[in-house]
Image (cartoon, grey):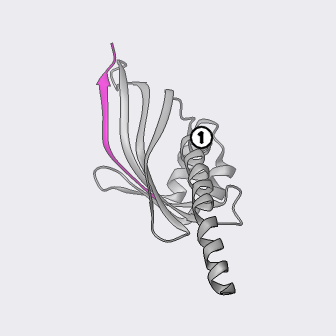
């Protein structure tokens, strides 16, 4: 009977823990991760990306963690009115999650014309209690990139 009570208590605690994890993950994806790029915070990004981190572009090209750090070092990321909207959190166990959604901002085309930039991304993160934000990014996949004329 005592064991059953403990199991019931553990089950009751799980949804609130999951809700706290999901709130933290949404904050990381919508605020923290973009800030690493916007503020050229190489040290922050270095601590957040897992050693084997890789990004897959729509054409299948892969870039590494070292590429991401070099990009942040080289130039600031300056989109106007950037927002990221989390659409899904898919759990693959208690410590592995895929966060997916849409990024949107105002930008300019290569010709200097204003456009509404958008993309879809899915990002795999693993729980990392030793990391500053409690999670590390393992991978990112970007697709559906577009830039519709603004006006």
Q: Quadrant of the N terminus?
A: bottom right
Mark 1 closeness class: few <14, some 14–19, many ≥20 residues within 10 Å = few
Q: In which quarter of the view is residue 38 placed?
A: top right
Residue found at the far front of this picture: 1
145 falls in the magenta region: yes
Dominant SS type (magenta): strand
Compared with 105, 5 (above or below) is below
Left or right of residue 53: residue 88: left
Q: In percent of the image, x 43 and y 24: which residue is there?
A: 106
Left or right of residue 43: residue 31: left
Q: Secondary structure at mark 1?
A: helix
- Residue beneath label 1, please? 31
Q: Quadrant of the C terminus?
A: top left
The picture places residue 72, in percent across and down from the top left corner, at 57, 44
Give, as a single range, the part of the protein colored magenta.
139-151
The picture places residue 127, in percent across and down from the top left corner, at 60, 66
Give 19 or 13, whichever is nearer the viewer.
Answer: 13
Q: In which quarter of the view is residue 22 placed?
A: bottom right
The picture places residue 48, in percent across and down from the top left corner, at 62, 56
Compared with 132, 143 (above or below) is above
Compared with 145, 66 (above or below) is below
The picture places residue 16, in percent across and down from the top left corner, at 62, 58
Q: In percent of the image, x 35 and y 51: which residue is there?
A: 57
Q: In percent of the image, x 37 and y 19: which residue is there?
A: 112
Give 70 or 133, whichever is nearer the viewer.
Answer: 133
């Amino acid at each position: 009977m005592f064991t059953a009570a403990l199991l019931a208590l553990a089950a009751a605690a799980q949804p609130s823990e999951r809700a706290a994890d999901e709130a933290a993950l949404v904050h990381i994806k919508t605020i923290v991760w973009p800030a690493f790029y916007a503020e050229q915070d190489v040290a922050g990004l270095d601590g957040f990306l897992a050693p084997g981190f890789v990004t897959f572009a729509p054409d299948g090209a892969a870039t590494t963690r070292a590429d991401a750090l070099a990009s942040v070092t080289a130039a600031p990321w300056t989109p106007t009115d950037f927002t990221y909207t989390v659409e899904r959190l898919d759990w693959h166990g208690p410590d592995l999650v895929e966060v997916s959604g849409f990024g949107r901002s105002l930008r300019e085309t290569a010709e200097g014309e204003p456009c509404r930039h958008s993309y879809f991304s899915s990002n795999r993160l693993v729980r990392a209690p030793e990391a500053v934000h409690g999670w590390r990014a393992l991978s990112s996949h970007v697709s559906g990139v577009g830039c519709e004329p603004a006006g």
